[in-house]
Image (cartoon, helix red, strand yellow):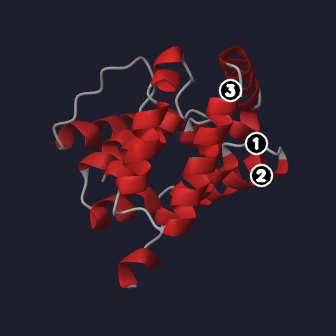
Amino acid sequence: MRIYKMLSVLLEYPDQELIDHLPELHDEIARCVDINDTERTAMQRFLEHLQNTPLTELQADYVKTFDLTAEHSLHLTHHLFGDDKNRGPALIDLGELYKDYGVEVVTNELPDYLPLILEFAAYLDDGEASVFLADANKVLGVLADHLKQAGSPYAALLSIVEGRATLTRLAA
């Protein structure tokens, strides 16, 4: 699903390439049929934030938010295990799941990195993606709450992911 790909891109470290492609992202969000109005508004507001903030400020905020604040880590197993030895098997299992679907990870990031997880979810159909992400629903909720409390513009994106990471979406 395209929304997961777009969220993945928006949750990555901001660079000039992202800024250069904001008009295309804006158009894609406007055209995408699998995004509801609330999600669309939140994503467009986030794009406006990116457009109206100098790149160096965006980068500094990203590092402060995600790299220097453990409660905001985009590595989801960190929220479950911290540095506990049980984190390793969880990372291995997730990496094996990617391989089972024929997805080759070509990044230096761990398999639990949220943009990578969203990239994988984009390969799945809507039902599969909801089931896959539902496993992380509690972690996504805690992460979204921490970002809201910090007043981070990224909170809106995490709220979208959390809202889609539920099995109740399948029953509706």
Distance between the Cα atoms at labels 1 and 3? 10 Å
User: Residue 46 appears at what percent x and percent y?
Assistant: 62, 44
| Residue to which mark 2 is pinned | 148
| Residue to which mark 3 is pinned | 62
| Badge 2: residue crowd in 10 Å (few <14, some 14–19, many ≥20) | some
Element under label 1?
Answer: loop
Contact flag, marks 1 and 3 (Cβ < 8 Å): no
- Give, as a three-letter code, the residue at label 2: Lys
- Give, as a three-letter code, the residue at label 1: Ser
Quarter of the image where the C terminus is located = bottom left
User: Residue 106 appears at what percent x and percent y?
Assistant: 30, 20
Disc 1 or 3, which lies upstream in sequence?
3
Of 59 and 48, the residue lying toward us: 48
Element under label 3?
Answer: helix
User: Residue 147 appears at what percent x and percent y?
Assistant: 74, 46
Q: Is residue 131 above or below residue 91?
A: below
| Residue to which mark 1 is pinned | 152
- Give, as a three-letter code, the residue at label 3: Tyr
Distance between the Cα atoms at labels 1 and 2? 6 Å
On the rendered structure, is 24 left or right of 63? left
Contact flag, marks 1 and 2 (Cβ < 8 Å): yes
Q: Is residue 33 visible?
A: yes
